[in-house]
Amino acid sequence: MTDLNVSSEPVKYNPDFAKEIYALESGEHVKLCMQCGMCALSCATREEMDYSPRKLFLLMRVGKREEFFKANTMWMCSTCLMCKVRCPRGIPLADVMHDLKSHAIKLGYTERPQATFYQSFWQEILNKGRVFEGGLMARYYLKRGWSEMTKGLFEMRDLGMTMLKHNRMPLKSPKSIKGLKSMKQIIERAQAQMHREEGR
């Protein structure tokens, strides 16, 4: 018989972590998951994930917090929405994954490059109300460190030169959007509302 390395020890469920995830804006939807596996069958990036979404939810339900947040599943979601379209329960998995990313960053699980990119993208939006590719990548590499910066520049030099040649990568930062102050106020109010709801 093949050794599947399955422990005979009973699983000790810890509901506290599940309650923490359920409290997120889209967290309640996770309760609807019936473990059918349709999300994995529909996912374009499933082969790149440590766990399929349904298996990630299992980790949550048994309280394996560290294993949950160290998995790359939420970061590999490309928001193609095929999982939501085919889910029998209509779970908005892209929204759930977005909330999980935000929560992971809030808790300090930022070692993955995708987490750094996520933070850099958000900071660029807050800065001008739009994304400047040069500013985005500068923020990203400053966070990731010098060694990764030199490696990234070397690996993407051909693509960068092609984009410059075809005017697809502006070197000058664009002007801020009109109403940037109002946009920031809206974001601040939304964040304050979210914190109030989390505190309930």
Image (tube, rainbow, N blue to C red):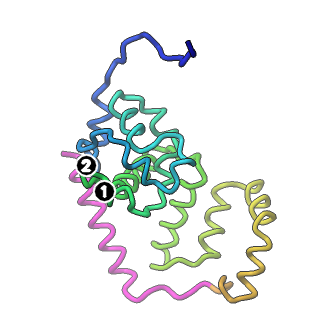
Q: Main secondary structure of the magenta part?
A: helix
Cβ–Cβ under 8 Å for marks 1 and 2? yes
Q: To which residue does mark 1 refer?
A: 92
* SS class, disc 2: helix
**Quadrant location of the N terminus in the rendered image:** top right
* SS class, disc 1: loop
Check the image and report above or below for 160 versus 85. Answer: below
Q: Nearer the viewer, residue 111 or 183?
A: 111
Residue name at image x 64 percent, y 68 percent = 137
- Relative image position of residue 56 (x, y in whole percent): 41, 39
- Relative image position of residue 39 (x, y in whole percent): 39, 49
Q: Earlier in the sequence, mark 1 or mark 2?
A: 2
Q: Which numbered disc covers residue 133?
A: none
Label 2, residues with CA under 10 Å away: few <14, some 14-19, many ≥20: some
**CA–CA distance in space, label 1 to label 2:** 7 Å
The total of numbered circles placed on residues is 2
Q: Which residues are magenta?
A: 173-200
Q: Amino acid at mark 2?
A: His
Magenta span has 197? yes
**Quadrant location of the C terminus in the rendered image:** top left
Residue name at image x 52 percent, y 71 percent = 124
- Relative image position of residue 116 (x, y in whole percent): 57, 56
Q: To which residue does mark 2 refer?
A: 29
Residue extending farthest front: 1
Asked if residue 150 lies left or right of residue 23, the reply is right
